[in-house]
Image: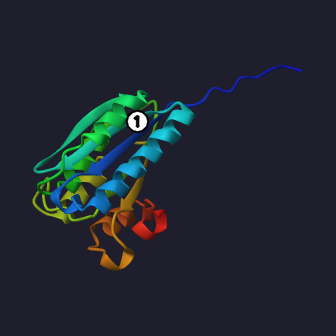
């Protein structure tokens, strides 16, 4: 008999969290933070890294670079500012750029939003989808979490999930 070691692959979760004005409702932002916290716990158990991107106003910014420091991520979530417009597609572009920098990792991008994107890279959602489709890095898995009930959907996240062949979860699916 011979012992054979199988190493785990490197994993990276990128949480793109909508912190715009439309997410200000206590229930929505609490759900988004709770989901982010669950991702943190799962990543800690698997020894994966997590990055946090918050998007609001005119831009998406990396709040926490990829790290395994759960306290740093928790602190960033607790102090997350809210307000302004919703740059949904710029957040996806930022997540894709970050994923491309970690090509050795299996990257999962989790977008948590109410889908009310109103800031675009190229002027419209359709143009941005075409732009993003050409730039998705390899070994990336996308998941969308819609912070509204299915009957209140505005359709943007459904379109993105369909085009990127990603699962979409609604509020009633995650509660």
Query: At 35% from the left edge and 49% from the top edge, which residue is drawn?
Result: 33
x, y percent for residue 133: 30, 54
Q: Which corner quadrant of the image does residue 61 belong to?
A: top left
Q: How is the image coloured?
A: rainbow
Query: Which of the image's four quarters has the N terminus?
Result: top right
What element does badge 1 sit on? strand
Of residues 9 and 54, the one drawn nearer to the viewer in this rendering: 54
In the image, taking residue 62 as reference, residue 173 lies left or right, namely: right
Query: At 35% from the left edge and 80% from the top edge, which residue is drawn?
Result: 151
**Residue extending furthest right?**
1
Query: At 38% from the left edge and 60% from the top edge, which residue is drawn?
Result: 145
**Residue 77 seen:** yes
Give the number of marks: 1
Query: At 56% from the left edge and 35% from the top edge, which residue is drawn?
Result: 45
Q: Which corner quadrant of the image does residue 152 belong to?
A: bottom left
In the image, taking residue 34 as reference, residue 18 lies left or right, namely: left
**Residue extending furthest top?**
2
Above or below, 81 relative to 123: above
x, y percent for residue 149: 37, 73
Of residues 132 and 86, the one drawn nearer to the viewer in this rendering: 86
**Residue extending furthest front?**
26
- Circle 1 packing at 10 Å, graded few (<14), some (14-19), many (20+), is many
**Residue 170 seen:** no
Residue holding disc 1: 50
x, y percent for residue 80: 24, 43
x, y percent for residue 103: 41, 32
């Amino acid at each position: 008999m011979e012992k054979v070691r199988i190493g785990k692959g490197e994993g990276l979760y990128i949480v793109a969290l909508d912190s715009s004005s439309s997410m200000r409702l206590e229930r929505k932002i609490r759900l988004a933070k709770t989901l982010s916290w669950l991702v943190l716990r799962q990543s800690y158990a698997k020894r994966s890294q997590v990055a946090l991107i918050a998007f609001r106003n005119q831009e998406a910014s990396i709040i926490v670079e990829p790290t395994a420091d759960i306290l740093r991520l928790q602190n960033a979530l607790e102090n997350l500012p809210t307000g302004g417009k919703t740059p949904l597609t710029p957040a996806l572009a930022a997540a894709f750029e970050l994923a491309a920098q970690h090509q050795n990792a299996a990257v999962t991008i989790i977008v948590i939003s109410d889908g009310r994107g109103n800031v675009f890279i190229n002027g419209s959602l359709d143009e941005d989808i075409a732009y993003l489709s050409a730039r998705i890095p390899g070994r990336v898995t996308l998941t969308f979490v819609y912070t509204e009930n299915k009957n209140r959907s505005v359709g943007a996240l459904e379109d993105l999930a369909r085009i990127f062949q990603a699962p979409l979860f609604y509020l009633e699916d995650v509660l």
